Amino acid sequence: MLKKFLALNRSKQAEILLWGLMFGRILQIFLCSVWARFHIPDVFLFNDIIIIVLMFMSIREWKYRISTRNIIAVVGLVLFYFLSGMFYSDSAEYVRDHGEAFIRAVLYIFVGLAIDINKHKYWLHQLSRIATVGFFLYITFMSSLANNPVDLEEENMYLAYLALPTTLFVIWQLLENLNIIDLVLSMVGSFLILSMGSRGPFVCIVFFVAAYLLFFKKYKRNALSKFLIAAAAALLYLFADSILLLLIGIVSRFGLNVRVLESLMAKNMFAAENSSGRDRIWTELIQAIMKDSTGFGYGLGGDERITSTGFEAHNVILAILISFGLILGGIILFLFIRYIFRAIKHTENTNQRVFLLILFTVGFVKLLMSAIFIVDYYFFMLIGYSIALSNLKSGNLTNTNI
């Protein structure tokens, strides 16, 4: 791999590293712990500088995939965001407080537009492997060396979701072509994510694996293979308690969080009492949406102002509808769904479809359970990639106009 990488010219090397860091954001966290060992004062700023340098070094490799209309559309989206704070006066403070995070996230539209999975699959695979190793090193001892230790007994949804994209990529490559390296790294990545104590990332892994095996995996004997998969799933279900007991013992021995495993064991993972208040939040938001006489919602952050708990919606659909109402919010959701379906329709090979599935999992399925969509990097990366795919011509990502 290293020899192959060094044989490339500088701009291609920079492009590979750029997309690796942007897609595998867990790598950025690992690098922060490395920079901290060298006593660099602002490790996050140092990462930003590296990304900017890589961007300028590689610009000739990807600039043709981003059109002037794309740039105008993103600028318009940023203007819409800040103007919403004027039209919805109650949202002004929320818009201002999240402004920088929104700009950082919305720029990921360009990442989605620029990544060509047919060209970058091999390198994203290798960097996803490295990211999984980096995740393991960060969890086990790098974070403590950087004076920012991870409490393994506490829930850490943030880290679990950061590691999810690269873990899914490694799982994809394992399911596509069984090999020992990806098998070990898939198990390590999934195990560490599971031990973070958050149920959402676990649901995302199950969703991706099930969708891939049912709709994307090519079998020599299709009916027989799917029957064997169903039989294996049935056996896992029958012996689930024994397997979970074994895993709980292993996880506990390492001092990791067993919340997800215990909820699976008790078969109450999705019970109302384990919803962290989401059922109550969703009920209150649905009632508020139906009571909105204007049809244009309550502005960004309306979910936090309306709910009795003061928490965000934990659901991207409800968040959009409470923010912009059934009329404007409905239009936004329609356009989002339209581009997703257009992307599916225009994909030309399995690589494009599965990478879209990965981004859909980490950029939308995740947002049905947690996070805030306006500051979620992968939500906007999914939008950019969907736009790129929906405008494909002759296999080139050259016509990516919104």
Image: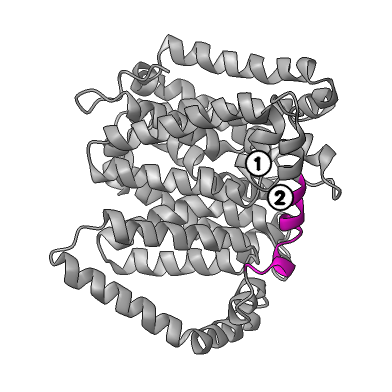
Foreground pick, 116 / 314: 314
Residue 25, image x, y percentages: 55, 44
Which of pointers 1 and 2 lies earlier in the amino acid sequence? Answer: 2
* Position of residue 160 in the picture relative to residue 164 (left or right): right
Q: CA distance from mark 1 to mark 2?
A: 8 Å
Q: Residue at x 54, y 32 (%)?
A: 333
The dot on residue 318 is: 1
Q: List the single residue furthest toward the left.
A: 220
Residue 122, image x, y percentages: 30, 46
Q: Say if 165 sits above or below 206 in the image.
A: above
Q: Say if 108 sits above or below 27 in the image.
A: above
Q: What residue type is disc 2 on? A: Trp
Q: Is residue 312 visible?
A: no
Instruction: Specify few, some or many for label 2: CA neighbours under 10 Å numbering under 14, 14-19, or 20 or more.
Output: some
Q: Residue at x 72, y 37 (%)?
A: 289
Where does the magenta region start and end? Answer: 270-284
Q: Residue at x 43, y 18 (%)?
A: 402
Foreground pick, 63 / 44: 63
Q: Say if 237 sits above or below 370 in the image.
A: below
- Look at mark 2 in the image and give the residue it sits on: 282
- Magenta segment: does it hold 157? no
Residue 359, image x, y percentages: 45, 43
* Position of residue 52 in the picture relative to residue 220 (left or right): right
- Contact (CB < 8 A) between labels 1 and 2? yes
Foreground pick, 44 / 211: 211
Q: Is residue 249 visible?
A: yes
Label 1, secondary structure: give it: helix
Q: Quadrant of residue 124?
A: top left
- Magenta segment: does it hold 279? yes
